[in-house]
Amino acid sequence: MSVLARYWQGLSPALRDYYRASVLPSLLFLALAFAHEWLARQPAASPALRLAAALAPAVAMAWLFTCYLRFLRDCDELERGIELKALAWAAGITLQGLMTVLFLLDAGLLAWPEKRLAAAMGLLLLASYALVRGGLHRRYA
């Protein structure tokens, strides 16, 4: 049996369902994000079209978040606890990172543009969630 097949078999039914349900919204998000990037560079695009292209990925992300909430509803108590602890830790780590960066910006010790700051905070949130979740799964497995 391949590593991927063993990994899939080791997942809880709720997590397998979540992975299946999140494929379409994830692909839609990627397609809409690329469409937004392309449309943002088109000088002839109307402001209404640019607005729609800017907001459309958020709708796909909301759909993905709905899938995640269903997963939290369907998983067992231990898995739900792990997920909620990982979310809480990730939020705290990201808030701490944001406060640190804001104070460094205010002191003139860091000169990041807004897009880089937003990207760094998003990356910090995702990375801290993944690391904490992985650590909690190892601890409770």
Image: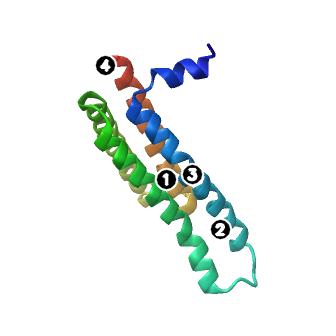
**Label 2 with label 3: CB-CB less than 8 Å:** no
Secondary structure, mark 2, is helix
- Identify the residue under disc 4: 140
Report which residue position mark 3 lands on.
24
Q: Nearer the viewer, mark 3 or mark 1?
A: 3
Q: Is residue 4 something one can see in this rendering?
A: yes
Question: Residue 36 location in percent, x, y?
Answer: 65, 68
> What crowding class fits label 1: few (fewer than 14 Cα within 10 Å), some (14-19), or many (20 or more)?
few
Scheme of colours in the image? rainbow
In terms of secondary structure, where does tag 3 sit?
helix
- Report which residue position mark 2 lands on: 36
Q: Does the residue at mark 4 contact the one at mark 3 (Cβ under 8 Å)? A: no
Residue 28, image x, y percentages: 60, 57
Q: Position of residue 68 (x, y in %)?
A: 39, 47
Mark 4 and 2 residues: CB-CB less than 8 Å, in contact?
A: no
Q: CA distance from mark 2 to mark 3?
A: 18 Å
State the SS at label 1. Answer: loop
Which of the two marks, 2 or 3, is nearer to us in this view? 3
In this rendering, would 33 be left or right of 61? right
Residue under numbered circle 1: 109
- The numbered mark, 4 or 2, whose residue comes first in the sequence reads 2
| Residues tagged 3 and 1 counted as in contact (Cβ below 8 A) | no
Q: Residues within 10 Å of mark 3 (few under 14, many from 20)?
A: some
Can you tell which of label 4 and label 3 is closer to the viewer? 3
Foreground: 111 or 56? 56
Task: Tell me the amino acid under the disc marked 3.
Answer: Leu
The circle drawn on residue 130 is none
Label 1 is placed on what type of residue? Leu
